[in-house]
Structure formats: structure tokens, C-alpha cells
């Protein structure tokens, strides 16, 4: 495998369904890059959250870049803020929610991919807005 180098403009962006309150910029994934995991920039709109979900074989990690929220996992609840890392074990039932003002930005990795890239890529193409670009470019 050769090194992979990308820029923010190279990240395809999707919302899984029209009603979802979070969307994803794919940094690297199984489909586009041939790696056995997926890493995305996951952006939660104000009040947005994931539905309760589980991945039988994959661990998931959220690194909060900006914003604040809550995570629930198998009866445990914790708060999240910029700089926090949340690692969810395979098989856990979990959800992540933006509880702050404005958007919450996370660098999210799932390993192995367990069809997450395919799910995202079958969603609705979207784009980063000006606010997203400013946050992700450090402006």
C-alpha cells in the first residue's frame, strides 16, 4: 500500500437519511482507500444525535474537536467536550448527542469498517458549509 494524502476538499460528504441531524465527511475508508477501517468528520447539528445503534464486531472512537454533548452506552452516561475521547466497545448499544449551542464536531473512527462506509456512501450527498470549513481549517 502506498501512502494516502488527502485534503479537506477531497472528503466526500453524506447524510445517511434526509431526517438525520448528523452528517459525515469521509476522511479515509474501505471503499475509497482500501483500508480496513473508516475515519470520518462527524458533524452534529445543534440538538442532533445518533439513533441508538450497535456494531457487533467493531469498536468506535469519537474525538471531540469542538462542541459538547452526551454519550450513552449500555446504561452508562457521560458528558463530552472538546478534547475528550470516547471509545465504545464492540456490541455495545450507544448513542451520541450534541447538547451544546451550535454544532459539535467529532473525528470518528470505526475499526473494522463493518459496512459503515457503505452505509454512509449510500446516503444523500451533501457539502461542508462555510462554518464547517472554518472549523476544520482552524480559522
Image (cartoon, rainbow, N blue to C red):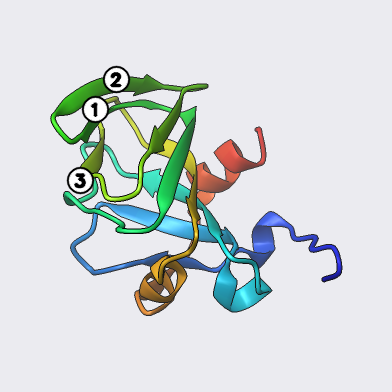
**Residue at x 82%, y 71% (from the top left corner):** 1
Instruction: Pinpoint residue 117: horizontal percent, then vertical percent.
Output: 46, 69
Mark 2 → mark 1, Cα distance in angstroms: 9 Å
**Residue at x 17%, y 35% (from the top left corner):** 74
Does 24 sit above or below residue 41?
below
Q: Residue furthest right?
A: 2
Disc 3, SS: loop
Horizontally, residue 33 falls left or right of residue 50, namely right
Q: For the residue carrying disc 3, how many other residues have a C-alpha within 10 Å: few (<14), some (14-19), or many (20+)?
A: some
As drawn, the label of residue 99 is 1
Mark 3 → mark 1, Cα distance in angstroms: 19 Å
3 vs 2, front mark: 3
Q: Nearer the viewer, residue 93 or 139?
A: 93
**Residue at x 30%, y 43% (from the top left corner):** 45
Q: Which residue is mark 3?
A: 93
Q: For the residue carrying disc 2, how many other residues have a C-alpha within 10 Å: few (<14), some (14-19), or many (20+)?
A: some
Instruction: Pinpoint residue 101: horizontal percent, then vertical percent.
Output: 30, 26
As drawn, the label of residue 79 is 2
Instruction: Pinpoint residue 51: horizontal percent, then vertical percent.
Output: 18, 51
Instruction: Pinpoint residue 3: horizontal percent, then vertical percent.
Output: 85, 63
Amino acid at each position: 500500500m502506498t501512502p494516502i494524502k488527502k485534503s479537506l476538499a477531497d472528503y466526500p460528504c453524506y447524510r445517511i437519511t434526509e431526517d438525520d441531524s448528523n452528517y459525515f465527511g469521509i476522511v479515509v475508508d474501505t471503499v475509497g482507500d482500501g483500508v480496513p477501517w473508516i475515519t470520518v468528520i462527524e458533524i452534529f447539528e445543534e440538538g442532533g444525535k445518533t439513533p441508538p445503534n450497535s456494531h457487533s464486531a467493531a469498536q468506535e472512537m469519537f474525538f471531540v474537536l469542538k462542541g459538547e454533548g452526551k454519550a450513552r452506552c449500555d446504561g452508562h452516561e457521560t458528558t463530552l467536550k472538546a478534547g475528550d475521547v470516547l471509545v465504545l466497545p464492540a456490541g455495545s448499544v450507544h448513542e451520541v448527542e450534541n447538547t451544546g449551542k451550535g454544532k459539535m464536531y467529532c473525528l470518528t473512527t470505526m475499526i473494522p469498517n463493518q459496512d459503515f462506509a457503505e452505509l454512509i456512501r449510500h446516503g444523500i450527498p451533501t457539502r461542508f458549509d462555510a462554518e464547517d470549513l472554518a472549523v476544520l481549517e482552524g480559522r
